[in-house]
Amino acid sequence: MKALVTGANKGIGFEIARSLGKRGYDILVGARDEARGRAAVEKLVAEDLQAAFIKIDLNDLDSLREAAKRVDSLDILVNNAGIPDSAKPGRAPLDIAKPTMDYTTEDLRTTMETNFLGTHELIKNLLPSLTDSAKIVNITVPISPTDFWHPLAYITSKAALNVMTLTFAYEFEKMGSHRQIFGIMPGAVATDLNGMEAGGHGGFVKSPEAAGELSTDIIVSGKNQNGQIIQYDGKIVTDYEIQLRG
Ligand SMILES: NC(=O)c1ccc[n+]([C@@H]2O[C@H](COP(=O)([O-])OP(=O)(O)OC[C@H]3O[C@@H](n4cnc5c(N)ncnc54)[C@H](OP(=O)(O)O)[C@@H]3O)[C@@H](O)[C@H]2O)c1
């Protein structure tokens, strides 16, 4: 059994890779930086897990096409790699957004290129390499604006990702395919993406290890989850449309 996880050199991606490895999968550690990717492979191998590096840079579409040619018999593809919308070194925790009206076209373009267009290109090119019952998993977020959080570029890119999840799922269903595509929302997790601390916000913020385990439980569940957007606790999001605050 083989799984490819993008952005697997750190954060949630590394922990999903590790958790899948512990459950018997050979892991392809997708990373855009070879040194960081190989360092993650070494950590997994040191735990007696099967892992190999594959260069996956979501901003280099040609390299994604080339990478896909080197993959076969893939059982699980986890599209985890992603960026917040205005990440700056030294930013405060949760400061991944700026006032909505301050966003530029460039902010939107950068985030869409990585979180949506690159991921789409990878999925499309890997389709011939997937097994008949393969699972494609897109790591995502809630997209409704809240008082707590509504970073325009980030949630716009994830909304596009979610629409892709739903439309590919529809096609799989229509074709009578046994393949599945679904989204997982890991909830708030303490990673470099947001600068939060595990256990923060009254215990609301999870460690990457916990997020990796919870996500992997969902990924390997024997259920048909095609077309679902699933929260870390297993709750299926049924009111997917944007909820405007009343
Ligand atoms: N943390 C949360 O609270 C939270 C909540 C819900 C969903 N998520 C989602 O979970 C996923 C992982 O985020 P994280 O929190 O683990 O953040 P993270 O620690 O910052 O990890 C992000 C990963 O994505 C990779 N990446 C970024 N841009 C890339 C590109 N152009 N090509 C290839 N890889 C790229 C990074 O590689 P480098 O090391 O090279 O930068 C890194 O491996 C993201 O999709 C995020 O939206 C996170």
Image: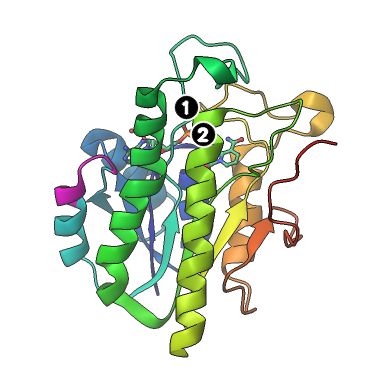
Q: Which mark is residue 154?
A: 2
Residue 154, placed above or below residue 227: above
Residue 143 or 214: which is nearer the viewer?
143
Q: Which residues are magenta?
A: 58-63
**Residue placed under numbered mark 1 in the picture:** 85
192 magenta-colored: no
Residue 21, placed above or below residue 127: above
**Amino acid type shown at disc 2:** Tyr
The quadrant where residue 188 appears: top right
Taking the spot 48% from the left edge, 49% from the top edge, the residue there is: 160
Q: Is mark 2 within 8 Å of ligand 1?
A: yes
Q: CA distance from mark 1 to mark 2?
A: 5 Å
Report the quarter where the N terminus lies: bottom left
The quadrant where residue 52 appears: bottom left
Say whether marks 1 and 2 touch (CB < 8 Å): yes
Q: Looking at the picture, how far across and down is residue 38, in whole percent?
A: 27, 42
Taking the spot 57% from the left edge, 65% from the top edge, the residue there is: 219
Q: Looking at the picture, how far across and down is residue 224, in whole percent?
A: 61, 79
Q: Which mark is residue 47?
A: none
